[in-house]
Image (cartoon, helix red, strand yellow):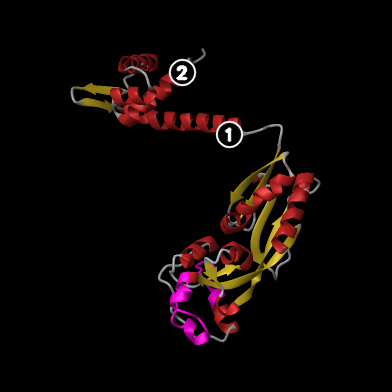
Amino acid sequence: MPVHLPSTKALRTFFTVATTLSFSKAAEKLCISQGAVSKQISALEQQLGQALFFRRVNGIELTEAGKTYLPQVSEAIHIIQSSTANLLQSDHTQDTLTVSVTPSFASLWLTPRIKAFLSQHSDLRVNIRTGDEPKISEAHDNDVIIRCLPISHHYEQATLLCQEKLLLIGSAELIKRKPIKNNDDLFSHTFIPHITRPELWEQFKLENKLGDVTKYHAVGFEHYYLSLAAAMDNQGLALVPDFMARAALKANKIVNPLGYGIESHFGYYTTIPHYKRGNRAVCEFEQWIYHEIRS
């Protein structure tokens, strides 16, 4: 025997009443009368065969059945809203390119430049995902994956975009206040730690013969975009990839004191699933990003 499901309207009314615990507030949110709200809830309770609310003189409360029902209804409404929004925002006349990149690569480099790629490919949409895991399951259906990986390893079906060159950077305001004219001046500054790759500062100190500089910021950051933000906030000096720092350097928001930088033992690689290498859009995006990052 088929089950007669409640209407979406009734479920939305229940959700609104349950989250406000007020028929009047729910009526305001739903732009209907309080009587209509009460009628829909009563009809839903009758359909379910059990009460969802206790009606009291000083207000309403969820019954145990209502408390059990609420999270499931909430999830269902979210799924419907999300699916509807995705469909409305999708243009099925366009191909979609899905790119998975690290958060810093996305925020500091790719996002400001992706419009240049799209201006040459008006028939494409691009979805940008972020993550740090070195291996991405093909089940995620990514078309292009960009990761920062050790150069010493060999990666099948991966193309090296560039070796990572890190620049010493600080805010223009900080360096103006505490100038850096030689190595000794660095000792008066605070270094911002990179918590996932703490060896970077040790390499920097060794290559630039700084000795044991141990004045580190009390807060370490996982991503370069966070380190850059902290440096621009005058919290200290940071090591940031040159191509990610380029825009802020050009805008004179940060400076590269003494021109110091190091080449880490990492590089940025693109990986394309083998079954997508014949896709025109995928190949054109890889070529575009290769030339753009080296320009």
Residue at 49 percent across and 87 percent down: it is: 184
What residue is pinned by disc 1?
A: 86
In this rendering, position of residue 257 left or right of residue 49: right
In this rendering, position of residue 77 left or right of residue 133: left
* Residue 267 is covered by the magenta coloring: no
Residue at 48 percent across and 84 percent down: it is: 185
Amino acid at the residue labelled 2: Ser
Give x and y (percent) for residue 182. 53, 85
Q: Assign a secondary structure to mark 2.
A: loop
Residue at 53 percent across and 61 percent down: it is: 225
Find residue 276 and name its label: none
Amino acid at the residue labelled 1: Asn
Does any portion of residue 143 appear in the rendered image?
no
Question: Where 175 falls versus 120 (above or below)?
Answer: below
The range drawn in magenta is 173-201
Question: Where 107 falls versus 213 (above or below)?
Answer: above
Q: In this view, which residue lies farthest toward the right?
A: 278
Q: Gap between marks 2 and 1, in whole Å?
A: 22 Å
* Residue 198 is covered by the magenta coloring: yes
Give x and y (percent) for residue 152. 70, 71
Residue at 74 percent across and 46 percent down: it is: 120
